[in-house]
Image (cartoon, rainbow, N blue to C red):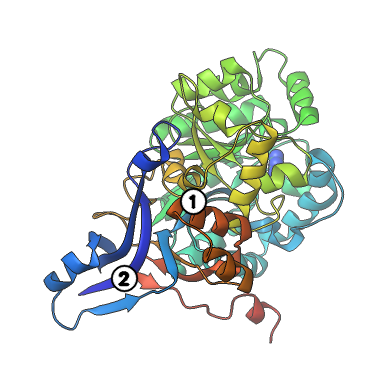
């Protein structure tokens, strides 16, 4: 049966890092999005499409709103939800002091399920409908995450973290276990509904060369499968990688020599990459996840999105929260911080570019642009409905904007979860099931 969503909307028909904003953005001030079986079957001006709808079609009409493609978070750690906003450290100390302690609990399916539910409900409250997510080393953590994701019918790429050195013993697997446990999860979950498995070495310092080799062999068996890890986030991390892998040309080479740099491989951070490394990522079709709230929080540095996108060989780049080093589930807040990162790099990220990174750009970075990231016929009906009057200040400020680009910029600078009025997942309006309130037993 058909249903429809009506209101102002935006989507992207081209990449605003390549063409001018006006040639990239499609804006309809009164659109009708027609949905059937979880997919968008038609999009156009409401006045044109309304007469073609079967009588009695359920239409949800949003006023004072902007409908955008469901947001895409290209890199997050659900198991770090309990320690988001842990004070004071940079990457390596932060991992040792907070992260590894927290992640040790995720062999317990009850803990993993509870946190996965909180994480996913937070994502949905923030309009995030597709994400690439790290579990912990425990296969149970990924079982729980996929199970909770399936119940909510979100699109998710996720995998078991693989690490066989330089972490507490209880968080280590081995080269063989990493291969076997990942493959068992692939068999159970890859391609189930909207879920895909992602091969997930944590980062080079916690994987032996043998483990990277095993995961390279696994990746070769599944040539279309996503891969996710971290790359060139922090200067101390990079010096450590150089000591651990003295034969490697650079950090990217550590992954590339094991066949882990390829299409649908997405690398978190990539702040401190050299030009030859960017070339190599681009030539191999790999992607970067820009994680600005995390990069500022951990003092990692200032990722330059213009440098990765506006070069003769652009690197696919998406936007990511990197919860829990990232400090917000909100892609609007993340865009706000991406704007500031760009300012520090001497250029202005337009709202059109920022929304692109959080939607279609992210979909391209994850290799799912044929399914999500745009509001167009054939796409999954994933939508975030942004509230142009979410707060008194936003409502007031919106009376002063003259263009859709200005309105989008106000939303990304002043908006957060309060600016997400509704989230649609595969054609269904998401109803909060209690979310965080339930977690505290109230
Ligand atoms: N590098 C290796 N592990 C992590 C992690 O959990 N978070 C971040 N931000 N960087 C990492
Ligand atoms: Zn991360």
Say which mark, if any, is on residue 345: none
Nearer-N-terminus badge (2/1): 2
The correct choice, above or below, for 296 with respect to 29 in the image is above
* Image quarter of residue 172: top right
Report x, y in % for residue 141: 61, 58
Taking the spot 44% from the left edge, 73% from the top edge, the residue there is 430
To which residue does mark 1 refer? 185
Which residue is most to the bottom? 442
Taking the spot 82% from the left edge, 41% from the top edge, the residue there is 90
Left or right for 158, reference 297 = left
Left or right for 230, reference 46 = right
Q: Residues within 10 Å of mark 2 (few under 14, many from 20)?
A: many
Say which mark, if any, is on residue 6: 2
Q: Residues within 10 Å of mark 1 (few under 14, many from 20)?
A: some
Report x, y in % for residue 401: 51, 58
* Image quarter of residue 330: bottom right
The correct choice, above or below, for 285 with respect to 435 in the image is above
Taking the spot 53% from the left edge, 64% from the top edge, the residue there is 398
Q: Which one is in front, 345 or 114?
A: 345
Report x, y in % for residue 256: 54, 22
Residue 36 in view: no
Left or right for 125, reference 366 = right
Describe the element under mark 2 as helix, strand or loop.
Answer: strand
């Amino acid at each position: 049966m058909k249903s429809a969503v009506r209101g102002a909307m935006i989507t992207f028909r081209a990449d605003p890092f390549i063409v001018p904003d006006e040639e990239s953005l499609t804006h309809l001030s009164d659109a009708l999005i027609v949905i059937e079986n979880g997919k968008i079957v038609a999009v156009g001006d409401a006045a044109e499409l309304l007469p073609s709808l079967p009588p009695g079609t359920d239409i949800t009409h949003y006023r004072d709103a902007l409908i955008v493609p469901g947001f895409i978070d290209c890199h997050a750690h659900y198991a770090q939800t309990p320690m988001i906003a842990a004070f004071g450290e940079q990457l390596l100390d932060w991992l040792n002091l907070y992260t590894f302690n927290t992640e040790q609990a995720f062999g317990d399916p009850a803990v993993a399920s509870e946190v996965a539910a909180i994480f996913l409900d937070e994502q949905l409250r923030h309009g995030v409908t597709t994400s690439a997510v790290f579990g912990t080393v425990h296969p149970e953590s990924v079982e729980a995450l996929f199970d909770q994701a399936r119940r909510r019918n979100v699109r998710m790429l996720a995998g078991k973290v693989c690490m066989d050195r330089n972490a507490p013993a209880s968080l280590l697997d081995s080269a063989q276990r990493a291969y076997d446990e990942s493959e068992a999860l692939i068999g159970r979950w890859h391609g189930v509904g909207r879920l895909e498995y992602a091969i997930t070495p944590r980062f080079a310092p916690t994987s032996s060369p043998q483990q990277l080799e095993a995961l390279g062999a696994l990746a070769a068996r599944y040539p279309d499968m996503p891969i996710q890890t971290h790359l060139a986030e922090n200067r101390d991390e990079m010096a450590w990688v150089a000591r651990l892998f003295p034969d490697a040309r650079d950090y990217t080479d550590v992954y590339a020599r094991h066949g882990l740099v390829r299409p649908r491989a997405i690398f978190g951070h990539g702040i401190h990459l050299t030009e030859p490394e960017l070339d190599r990522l681009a030539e191999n079709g790999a992607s970067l996840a820009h994680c600005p709230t995390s990069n500022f929080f951990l003092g990692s540095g200032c990722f330059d999105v213009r440098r990765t996108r506006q070069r003769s060989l652009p690197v696919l780049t998406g936007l990511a929260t990197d919860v829990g080093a990232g400090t917000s589930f909100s892609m609007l807040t993340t865009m706000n911080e991406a704007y500031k990162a760009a300012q520090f790099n001497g250029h202005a990220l337009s709202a059109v570019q920022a929304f692109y990174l959080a939607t279609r750009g992210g979909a391209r970075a994850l290799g799912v642009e044929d399914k999500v990231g745009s509001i167009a016929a054939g796409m999954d009906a994933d939508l975030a409905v942004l509230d142009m009057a979410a707060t008194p200040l936003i409502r007031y400020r919106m009376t002063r904007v003259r263009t859709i680009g200005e309105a989008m910029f106000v939303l990304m600078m002043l908006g957060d979860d309060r600016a997400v009025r509704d989230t649609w997942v595969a054609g269904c309006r998401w109803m909060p099931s209690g979310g965080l309130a339930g977690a505290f037993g109230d």
